[in-house]
Amino acid sequence: DPYGGVVRNGRIYGRGACDMKGGVGAALFALEALAACGIELAGDVVFEAVPDEETCAMGTVATIARGYRGDAGLVPEPTRFNLWIATRGLLHGTLTVPGRSAHAEMNQPPWREGGGVNAIQKAAHVLDAVERLTDDWAGREDKRHPLLGTPLVQPTGIRGGTFISNVPERCTIDLNATYLPGNADERGYGAIPRWEIEEAVADATAEDDWLSEHPPTWSWYTDYPPSEIDPQSPIVGTAREVGRELGVDVTPVGIDTTYDGALLTLFADTPSPAFGPGDLTRAHAPDEWVGIDELVLAARLYARAMVAWCGTAAAS
């Protein structure tokens, strides 16, 4: 049962147990433990538990808009107690390829004479261009990063046609594209890779007589920026040091997907690597789980990190 919260053999099973309710719970428990031990921190700790973490991060955007800031942050993603210090950016868009409806069982005259045009077949031409662009990116130096994978453009959804006997007059393609911090524009977003994608499609449509006069149209609706934190950043050093105290090898790594810390780092001037219990490979899958031992260790790490970062108040 995804909502069962079943405890079995030292694990908690349930949707989001690993990604990332476990980490959020461990962070909250760390704060409660410090209070229970009578430890008064010299600095402030802001605990944020926000909605929309899996899509556009509007919860984190809202906290930033309301003025919440920190000298640094830790995001309790399932990182296996490594530190995510670099992420790729993310573009979501939909491309609509036009055709012309007609009776599918009738041989059609040329389109200039009023014949039908199969939008699905025209979309295949566009998809070839997208695949060639991904191949081109794989061979370019500016698309390489020591901690991140080569960016991709991938079709993730396709819809076309209304009836089996009709030539489809429209085909829409959903595209998911990633990009590196070094490929971002001056604002930190994906205008440059978006332009490359549009140009690749435009070049392909120019080769087709129908598409050159009836070009596809774009709808872009997600641009999640990439981020990168200096491996020598103080928060990275603090997390690694508390790891050493508890026998955990905390290694700075990259993550090819996105997480809310990118927004905190870029727009709240709060460098925020991800650091938490669990393994991302267990997430978004049947029987998702997190180990209770992982949660206990995470709470200990977070408590020590808060004390190390903030210091403790002098006794009155």
Image (tube, grey):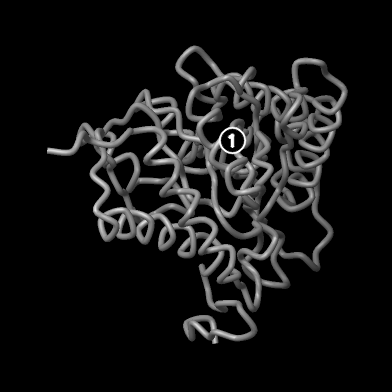
Please provide percent x and percent y for residue 118: 74, 52
Residue visible at 74% across and 42% down?
A: 111
219 and 314: which is toward the camera: 314
In this image, 291 relative to 140: left or right? left
Residue 106 picture quarter: bottom right
Residue visible at 74% across and 24% down?
A: 145
Residue 167 picture quarter: bottom right
215 and 291: which is toward the camera: 291
Mark 1: amino acid = Arg
129 and 17: which is toward the camera: 17
Give the answer, above or below, for where 302 lies relative to 10.
Answer: above
Residue visible at 41% across and 49% down?
A: 303
146 and 285: which is toward the camera: 146
Circle 1 SS class: helix
Give the answer, above or below, for where 88 lies relative to 24.
Answer: above
| Residue corresponding to mark 1 | 240
Please provide percent x and percent y for residue 78: 58, 54
In this image, 144 relative to 95: left or right? right
User: Could you tell me which quadrant the N terminus lies in?
Assistant: bottom right
Please provide percent x and percent y for residue 19: 54, 61
In this image, 252 relative to 128: left or right? left
In this image, 312 relative to 219: left or right? left
Please provide percent x and percent y for residue 141: 81, 16
